């Protein structure tokens, strides 16, 4: 099988790595253009490009996916199949080029959580199970016929970052299995039930304020569902504080967002019903730290209000 692989972030790297370990021919890799990243705005490569260069794979970085020159490059490569993992939305004239079509790896059990942030929303919504799906691309995003799915549980304390890493590995296995199935002529794509579809839209900073009036469990799920990125935040006396890890505890409160307990190594905040124990936190302009380290250098007292 002659494969063109399309992907950009860390999430996609295990998939291309495992394809190569199974000795599939990767004719080219398509990834996002180089651009300045980080505080220093140094021009850097995407994780997929870094991997590709190390393994001497041809790399294409089109600005415009509808550019005739790029389309011609794909045609000349004559791929049997294109594999897409965390890339951009492909135009019809691209995803229809390969002999056996183009399939995408999505980090949810479709049709649930269609959209840009499936891992975050699954955890925010308190799901106990998630997984990955491979499906053939169609015009509408995340709606194509399903090829394979693989499931995994979500622990009650798991963060989005932890589930991201686990699904990246599970997804790589599923990508290889999907290619093997297509190669053997055993693909049996099944349509999604659109009545079961749920959205997973992109999350912006203004969406990440901690909902202290919600139940302790919902606030806990919200925080871990945004950890480590984009990170849930709250304010204390005008200062922004990011929260990364918490525990939901039984401590009745009628004052959401109020500090109920503050010791040398614990900080407990009221919610809509019980309370949250804060475990990992970050003050504005400082590094992320465990709560006992944070409390040694930050002044916060019982009765203070978090907004």
Image (spheres, rainbow, N blue to C red):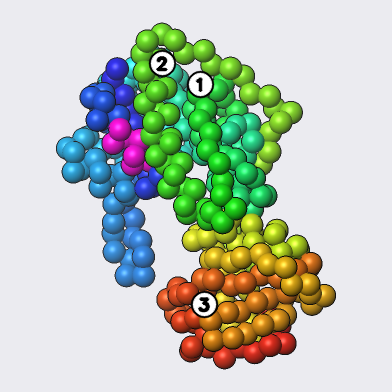
Could you tell me what secondary structure mostly forms the magenta stretch? Answer: helix
Quickly name the residue at label 1: 147
Q: In the image, is 27 to the left or to the right of 203? A: left
Residue 165 visible (yes or no) = yes
> Which residue sits at x=62%, y=19%?
191
Image mark for residue 291:
3
In the image, which residues are magenta? 12-18
N-term-proximal mark, 2 vs 1: 1
Res. 174 image quadrant: top left
What is the tally of numbered marks visible in this picture? Answer: 3
Q: Earlier in the sequence, mark 1 or mark 3?
A: 1
In this rendering, would 113 be left or right of 24? Answer: right
Above or below, 77 relative to 164? above
Contact flag, marks 2 and 1 (Cβ < 8 Å): yes
Q: Which residue is mark 2?
A: 181
Residue 92 can be seen in this image: no
């Amino acid at each position: 099988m002659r494969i063109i692989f399309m992907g950009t972030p860390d999430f996609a790297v295990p998939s291309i790595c495992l394809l190569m370990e199974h000795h599939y021919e990767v004719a080219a890799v398509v990834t996002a253009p180089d651009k300045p990243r980080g505080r220093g705005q140094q021009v850097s490569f995407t994780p997929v490009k870094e991997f590709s260069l190390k393994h001497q794979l041809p790399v294409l970085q089109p600005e415009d996916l509808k550019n005739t020159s790029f389309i011609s490059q794909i045609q000349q490569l004559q791929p049997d199949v294109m594999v897409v993992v965390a890339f951009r939305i492909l135009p019809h004239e691209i995803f229809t080029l390969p002999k056996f079509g183009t399939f995408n790896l999505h980090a949810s059990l479709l049709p649930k959580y269609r959209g840009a942030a499936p891992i975050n929303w699954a955890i925010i919504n308190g799901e106990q199970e998630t997984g990955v799906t491979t499906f053939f691309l169609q015009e509408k995003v995340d709606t194509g016929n399903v090829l394979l799915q693989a499931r995994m549980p979500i622990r009650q304390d798991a963060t989005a970052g932890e589930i991201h890493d686990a699904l990246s590995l599970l997804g790589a296995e599923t990508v290889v299995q999907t290619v093997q199935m297509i190669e053997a002529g055993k693909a049996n794509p099944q349509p999604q039930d659109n009545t079961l579809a749920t959205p997973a839209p992109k999350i912006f900073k203004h969406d990440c304020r901690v909902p202290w009036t919600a139940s302790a469990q919902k606030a806990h799920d919200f925080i871990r569902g945004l950890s480590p990125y984009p990170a849930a935040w709250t304010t204390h006396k005008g200062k922004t504080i990011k929260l990364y890890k918490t525990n939901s505890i039984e401590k009745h409160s009628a004052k959401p967002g109020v500090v109920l307990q503050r010791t040398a190594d614990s900080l407990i905040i009221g919610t809509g019903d019980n309370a949250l124990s804060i475990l990992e936190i970050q003050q504005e302009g400082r590094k992320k730290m465990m709560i006992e380290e944070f409390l040694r250098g930050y002044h916060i007292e019982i009765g203070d209000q978090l907004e």
